[in-house]
Image (spheres, rainbow, N blue to C red):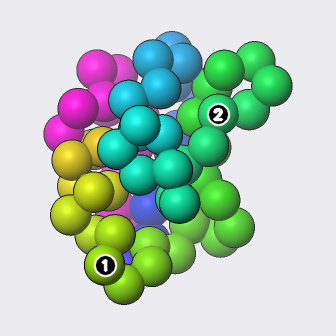
Amino acid sequence: MRTNVDATKCSGYGACEEHCPSVFQLDEWGYAAVTGDGTIPAGDEERVRKAVADCPETAITIAD
C-alpha cells in the first residue's frame, strides 16, 4: 500500500503530518510530502487513512 500527496492541491494545513509523521513531512515552505517512496509501513495504515479523511484539500490518495 502506498500514499501520495498532490502538491498542486496541498495548502499546508499539516494535519497529515500530525496524524502520521512517519509517512508525511512538511517541506521548507510548509507543504506536505511523503517520506521515501510513499510506502505505508505496517501498522500505520489507519493513521494514513485518518490523514486522508482529514485533508481539507483532498490532496492525499492511497493506492494498493
- Determine if the magenta segment contains residue 29: no
- Nearest to N terminus: mark 1 or mark 2: 2
Q: Residue at x 41, y 52 (%)?
A: 20
Q: Amino acid at mark 2?
A: Leu
Q: Residue at x 38, y 29 (%)?
A: 15
Residue 45 left/right relative to 9: left
Q: Residue at x 60, y 53 (%)?
A: 34
Residue position for label 2: 26
Q: Residue at x 35, y 44 (%)?
A: 19
Residue 45, percent across and down? 28, 70
Residue 18, percent across and down? 41, 37
Residue 60, percent across and down? 39, 43
Q: Amino acid at mark 1?
A: Gly
- Mark 1: secondary structure: loop
- Mark 2: secondary structure: strand
Point out the stretch of residues depicted in magenta: 53-64
Residue 39, percent across and down? 52, 75
Image height of 19 relative to 39, above or below: above
- Determine if the magenta segment contains residue 58: yes
The quarter of the image holding the N terminus is bottom left
Quarter where residue 58 is shown: top left
Residue position for label 1: 43
Image height of 48 relative to 2, above or below: above
58 or 55, nearer to the observer:
55
